[in-house]
Image: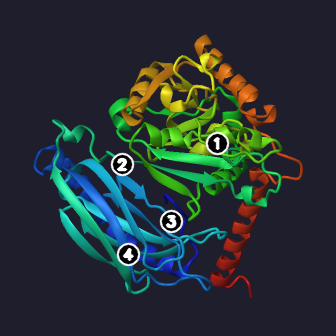
Amino acid sequence: MPGGRRNPFSVSRIVDAVQNAKSHAHDVAETTKSLAKAKLGEIPFVDVEIQFIGASGLPKLDVVGSADPYFVANIDEKVSFVSAVKANTLTPVWNETWRVKNVPATADIRVEIMDKDEGAPHDDYVGKFKTTVSPGAKEAEIEGPLFRRTRGTFWLKVESHPSKDANPSKFPYLFDGPIRFSRHFSPTVGYLTNLDDVRLYSTWKIYLKGVPLFFGDQYQCWNKEYKAAQSIFQGPASIAVRSSIQAGHRMLYARTAKDGSGVIDEFADLSQILHGGLGTRPGAQKYAQFANRIKPAVYTYIISAEDDSFRFSETGAAFFVDFASKHALHSNCAEKVRYSGEFHPRPKGGWAAFSDDIQDNEVDWELVIDNNSGTYAPDKMLLPELRELLEYNFPGFGIYAWDHEDPKLKESRETCRAYALKYRGVGQDELQPHAVDGEETLLQHATVHAQNVERAGKRVYDSVTGNDE
């Protein structure tokens, strides 16, 4: 499930699955029927804005501490929303907003509340509730898994208006903002004493709005001609390769109370994400003046087919070491994505003509994005649509979308890297994935973690079936 993993071996999970199985087929049928009627004009479409306010009376599920709750919401299981994790509280306040266009007026909002259990293979399941998209303030009882006992109260507010689109049935359940982002850290970052740059152990996820408006039903499937992709998606040996990459992905993008998060409303919000921050390698203090300035860096990205999120990290990120594909690590080995490649920020016209005497707010900024991905080999004919999508989501940035074979791209990218090396204290080794002496790589960490999960699952299974006697 988005945002976390429920323990498939827990008794409450098994009971809940049995209870849900009876109603799920009926719910799917009703949703399909409602959408069909809406497309025929029998049910109106509405644009909704949901404010998830907070909850109270949550149960304490851990022996030590309180709870670290978050929730996963969906509308008719067509579009989903994952909240931030609130640390150490049984009365979380979120005040997070979700806008979705072109929703059938009969649609349901389903919410599952989870308790983040850091260091464990699965998060604890608190409970769930269901309500409608009809407007108004709502107070919902959170229904627990065992005997449907109440596990607290959840408050939300729904605003609903007739859809503004002339043809709302063309793009139903269309996410319309806010554009939220989260920053995640590799689990190996905590084991290092000689850390070069926290950015090299970070991933970002930005939820883009309006992706179907630009890409329609077009997706980019894995490249069957690319050897690395074949090792991930083809043949018996690929199962083990995928397992390691997926374990690494879950660790990289696991939501925790330590994540950075926010909303992108304007140019300054995105530019702040691109700031260099403080480095920790010897001599880094010399470049501390650039901590709050846009860093000349190249990023690897994918646009997910699962949730339309823009996921990226620096191309030289340390956690890429030993993985068969950077893009597959970001996509969780998805067989298709919306798009993928690399991008880099630059001052208008490029880094070659720039001087650090010029403040960032005194110059216009651009994002140069491409389709440089062997794993998915995105169609270059969709580069104009990619440019329009980013213009729609990131106003204030000039967007250039170039094919990976375009000479202009290579010149701009290498100029960016050269500026980083010469003026910003970036080491040559930071431009490509690397591990420092004695460092446990993410692949090693993920492999051990996956083995521990498998052993734990087997112990639970044996205890339930009596095989441990």
Q: Is residue 451 left or right of residue 202?
A: right
Can you say whether 144 is above or below 290 in the image? Answer: below
> Circles 2 and 3: CB distance less than 8 Å?
no
State the residue position of label 2. 178
Of labels 2 and 1, earlier in sequence is: 2
Q: Residue 70 in the image: x percent, y percent?
A: 47, 67
In this view, the residue farthest toward the left is: 42
Q: Residue at x 62, y 18 (%)?
A: 412
Q: Residue at x 69, y 24 (%)?
A: 419
Front residue of 30 and 174: 174
Looking at the rendered structure, which numbered label has been put on residue 85? 3
Can you say whether 392 is above or below 402 in the image? Answer: below
Secondary structure of the residue carrying tag 3 is loop
Q: Residue at x 57, y 39 (%)?
A: 274
Q: Quadrant of the C terminus?
A: bottom right
Of labels 2 and 4, earlier in sequence is: 4
Front residue of 47 and 393: 393
Can you say whether 289 is above or below 64 in the image? Answer: above
Of labels 1 and 3, earlier in sequence is: 3
- Disc 4 marks a residue whose amino acid type is Ala
Looking at the rendered structure, which numbered label has been put on residue 117? none
Determine the image quadrant of residue 447: bottom right
Q: Gap between marks 2 and 3, in whole Å?
A: 18 Å
Counting labels gives: 4
Q: Gap between marks 1 and 3, in whole Å?
A: 27 Å
State the residue position of label 1. 291
> Circles 1 and 3: CB distance less than 8 Å?
no
Determine the image quadrant of residue 135: bottom left
State the residue position of label 4. 55
CA neighbours of label 2 inside 10 A, class few (<14), some (14 to 19), many (20+): many
Of labels 2 and 3, earlier in sequence is: 3
- Disc 1 marks a residue whose amino acid type is Ala
